[in-house]
Image (cartoon, rainbow, N blue to C red):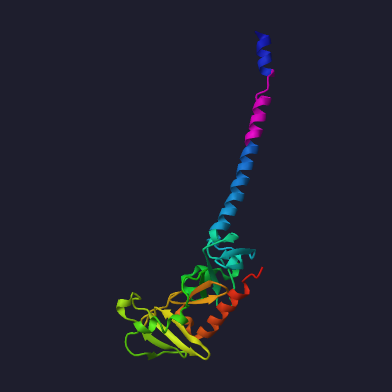
Amino acid sequence: MSGHHSQTEEAPLISNRFIYRLTTVVALLALLTAGISLGGRWFGEKISLAGHTDSEELVSLQIGQDKLELPANIIRFRDQRRSGTSERADLYLTWPEMSGFRPELRARFDDAGQSSTLIFLQLSQSTMSRDMSGRVDPIYSKLFDGPPEQAEFGLTLHRLDPEAGYGPEVLLTASRPGEDDYAVRCLLPAAGERSTGGDCQRDIHVGQDLSVLYRFSSDLLEDWQHIDAAVRSFVEARLSTR
């Protein structure tokens, strides 16, 4: 009896097997904690980017007959940032820098109140033989409702027939020597209201068969000539000849 009691007193209170299991559990918990920390940081970064990317890696897109090489940070949607054949590409650029997303510019991309400093582009294969300027005479002029009105910045305002399906939109035009008239459709804000980030839109033809529809704030109408030239130049510079 005394021998049994002695063996009981001499046996370790914590067995080696228990220590091994405890060490394993602690190690697993440490790994799990590290994984959660890293995963949380990654997820937090993804949340903070809110779909944007600051990567300038080139994405090669084939749209119709045109191939373009576009930096990823100007492409709005994540699923379009893959090289290959695509029906369209949606882009956004700061004005007047014509720059894509960068962390220091985050407020301009995320704050609706600053969206008037962005230009939104949609590139797709042309479905019409004429761009917006080319459609003024054969189409829009047939829809004018009332006499033209003088607008600011050298533009002429044309109201459209309410039955034409354009709602309260107006067409603004301007003569350009040697070219079709400039034309842009706008949903102008009422007196006292603020414009939105894309209440004016215009489309142009670029490259072989590319339609470039771009939208901008009516607050930027003063720069209509510079915007039109900048958009065309920007897209043409990214057309690939290979």
Q: Residue at x 57, y 73 (%)?
A: 208
Residue at the image point whose x is 30% and y is 79% from the top: 162
- Magenta stretch contains residue 93: no
Q: Position of residue 39 (x, y in %)?
A: 59, 50
Q: Is residue 88 above or below residue 186?
A: above
Residue 201: where, in percent of width, then height?
45, 76
Residue 96 in view, yes or no = no
Q: Left or right: 167 with respect to 129?
A: left
Image location (x, y in percent) of residue 210: 54, 71
Q: For the C terminus, which image quadrant?
A: bottom right
Asked if 144 appears above or below 42 in the picture, the reply is: below
Magenta span dominant secondary structure: helix
Residue 21: say if magenta: yes
Q: Which residues are magenta?
A: 10-25
Residue at position x 30%, y 77% in the image: 163
Q: Is residue 90 visible?
A: yes
Residue 191 drawn at (x, y percent):
36, 83
Quarter-of-image position of residue 187: bottom left
Asked whether, in this view, residue 78 is left or right of residue 151, the answer is right
* Horizontal side, residue 59 vs residue 159: left or right: right
Question: Considering the image in quadrants, where does the N terminus appear?
Answer: top right
Viewer-nearest residue: 240 or 216: 240
In the foreground, 87 or 30? 87
